[in-house]
Amino acid sequence: MGYVLVQPSEADTKTASGIILPESAQEKPAQGKVLACGDEMVMENGKTVKCPVKVGDKVVYKKWGGDEIKVEGKELKLVKFDDLMAILE
């Protein structure tokens, strides 16, 4: 299984109308910046799947996708290639 290391974007602290949200009401966005790409993945049929993104890309991933990890105090996500949904420009 191929993985991508993503630094999630910060949660919005205000609504569009300017209301400040308490931390408990802030929704973690399912997007972030790619910090590293895993090795290519070899499928059961022998085909190779390369990492679909590159370091520095901003990506959207499935809301419940990925595993949260902490590295040097930062919360990061390990997201499977299959859980990536889009690259933002």
Image (tube, rainbow, N blue to C red):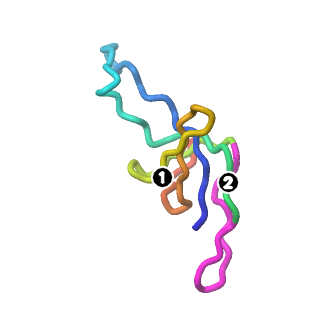
Residue 68 percent across, percent down from the top left: 49, 46
Please give the name of the residue rendered at 64% of the width and 70% of the height, measured from the top-left corner.
41
- Residue at image point 61% right, 53% down: 4
> In this rendering, would 17 be left or right of 2?
left
Q: What residue type is disc 1 on?
A: Gly
Figure check: 42 above or below 18: below
Image quadrant containing the C terminus: top right
Inspect the magenta stretch and tell me whether residue 53 lies in it.
Answer: yes
Q: As shown in the figure, which amino acid type bears the numbered disc 2?
A: Cys
User: Around disc 2, counting alpha carbons within 10 Å, would you say few (fewer than 14), some (14 to 19), or many (20 or more)?
Assistant: many
What secondary structure is the stretch in magenta mostly built from?
A: loop
Q: CA distance from mark 1 to mark 2?
A: 14 Å
Evaluate whether residue 89 shows in this view: no
Say which of 68 and 34 sits in front. Answer: 68
| Mark 1, residue position | 66
Helix, strand, or loop for circle 1?
loop
Question: Dividing the image into 4 quarters, which one contains the N terminus?
Answer: bottom right
Q: Position of residue 54 (x, y in %)?
A: 69, 50
Element at badge 2?
strand
Depicted 42 relative to depicted 28: above or below: below
Find the magenta span and give its range: 40-55
Task: Find out whether residue 15 is within the magenta segment.
Answer: no
| Residue located farthest toward the bottom when viewing the structure as drawn | 45
Tell me the residue at 66%/60% (across/down): 51
Quick check: can you spot residue 87? yes
